[in-house]
Amino acid sequence: MSVCVTEAEWTEWFDRDDERGSGDWEKLSDLHKAYPDRLCSTPMDIQAESHDGVPSNETGDVIYKSDRDYGFVCLNKDQSHGLCHNYRVRFLCGKLVRPQASISIERLSNSTVLELAEPAEGWGPGDRLVLASTDYSMHQAEEFTLLPCPACGPTQVKVQGKPVFLHMGEEVDGVDMRAEVGLLSRNILVRGEMEPGCYGNEACNFFAFDTFGGHMKVI
């Protein structure tokens, strides 16, 4: 099974349970049963806040669990004042749309197939790639190692591991949001032209070879 992660959006807020009883249980499995058509099967993230709009990590409550695969749980027994706030949750879901460039995650193996906009010429197994961040943080850029992929097309490459962050793969509202993919495993040779002998300055009194140098600037 593979999923094309090309765009993501937050769901509406859900509040199936409240603080009465043992605590506030907003389990993903229960929410799927209560709202089968309004929540994706495999969320990419979760957010929880009180009904006053205060994020769960700022309410002062001890949170038992906040996990995208399980849901959110606050237990009354863990609170010094004996009662949790009433929370609501929402999930980040990916849209399954036709991308111009995307990431396919093979869930049964530790690998990922990158869908590229152009053929990857000269790339081979063992090469290192960088997948650029499409977030405001440059620290969401990720590096991967290329794997053999006989079944891949000209614009597909398979890499070792799975991305930690979400990388956009399409144009959004006319803006190209696709993540750049670059090859790191390459050598670049920069060679300057040397004159056969020394010329042009007083250094020739001491040296018989070309003493002029140059500067290289990489941006």
Image (tube, rainbow, N blue to C red):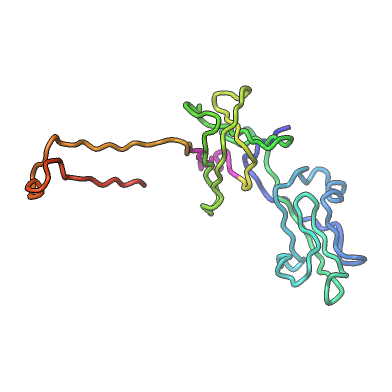
Name the residue located 79 percent from the left edge and 59 percent from the top edge.
65
Task: Give the dominant element type of the magenta stretch: helix, strand or loop.
Answer: loop
Q: In this view, does 49 lie to the left or right of 195?
A: right
> In the image, is residue 75 above or below residue 162?
below
Is residue 34 or residue 169 the one in the foreground?
169
156 or 159: nearer the eye? Answer: 159
Relative to residue 48, is residue 112 depicted above or below? above
For the record, the magenta segment spans 167-182
Which quadrant of the figure contains the N terminus? top right
Residue 174 visible? The answer is no
> Quick one: which residue is furthest to the right in this view?
21
Q: Does the stretch in magenta take in 174? A: yes
Taking the magenta stretch, the answer to whether it contains residue 98 is: no
Whether residue 144 appears in this view of the structure is yes
Q: Is residue 167 above or below residue 157?
A: below
| Camera-side residue of 209 and 21 | 209
